[in-house]
Amino acid sequence: MKINKTALAFGILTLLVTATGGYAQKIKYNYVRGTDFSKYQTYKWVRVEKADYPNQILDDQIMQSIDRQLSQKGLRRIDTGTPDLAMVYQVALRGERQWNSYSTGGYGWGWGGWRGWGGMGGSTYGSTTTITIGTLNLDMYDIQTKKQVWRGEATKTLDPPKDPDKLQRKIDDAMKKLLKNYPPKQK
């Protein structure tokens, strides 16, 4: 039996992309066009009243990861005085239903095919599971104008693995991707 190497390689590549695509983090961002982001040098963390935050350990991991990325972008965190930006993050953990199904198929026979007499129908069987997806939103507010100037969202970031080091790598990777386009390149 001859194996077409190109078809085999394409099949393996398709399988890998499909298998890993479902687990990839989704990153979105938006910003106010015309904003001069070069004027922002400092920021301060701000909490949203009545918002849910994760446990203290995870909270520290998230803020430190964001701090590292922002310092590489030229922003400096300050805890006293008036900063240029107010930095706010929030997390949301939600359940997403996933439907897993398969069909037994079916076929018809007899006079007139599907429209005629006789035949056998197919059945669909399935189950549902709930997947927890962690979404992290990061917002930046200009202190002078008191307006939001940038927002980013990383989904599937906080789905906790068993290994704490793996969770930290996952958070760091998500924050790096999230802040890749900060400051935004404006035309």
Image: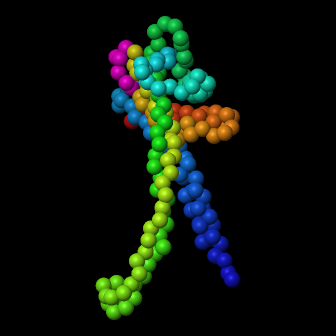
Q: Residue at x 45, y 15 (%)?
A: 84
Task: Judge whether residue 26 can be spotted in this image.
Answer: yes
Q: Can you give x and y, in whole percent of width and height, for residue 147 in the image?
A: 35, 21
Asked whether residue 30 is drawn in magenta, I would say: no
Task: Look at the picture and state if 116 lies above or below 5.
Answer: below
Task: Look at the picture and state if 79 lies above or below 23.
Answer: above
Seen from the viewer's position, the closer of residues 63 and 182 is 63
Q: Can you give x and y, in whole percent of width and height, for residue 33 in the image?
A: 35, 31
Asked whether residue 147 is drawn in magenta, I would say: yes
Q: Residue at x 35, y 17 (%)?
A: 146
Quadrant of the snapshot with the N terminus: bottom right
Seen from the viewer's position, the closer of residues 58 and 19 is 58
Q: Residue at x 46, y 9 (%)?
A: 82
In magenta, the rendered stretch is 144-149
Q: Residue at x 44, y 67 (%)?
A: 124
Q: Is residue 109 left or right of residue 156?
A: left
Task: Look at the picture and state if 76 lies above or below 186.
Answer: above
Q: Can you give x and y, in whole percent of width and height, for residue 18 in the image?
A: 55, 58
Q: Is residue 167 left or right of residue 115?
A: right
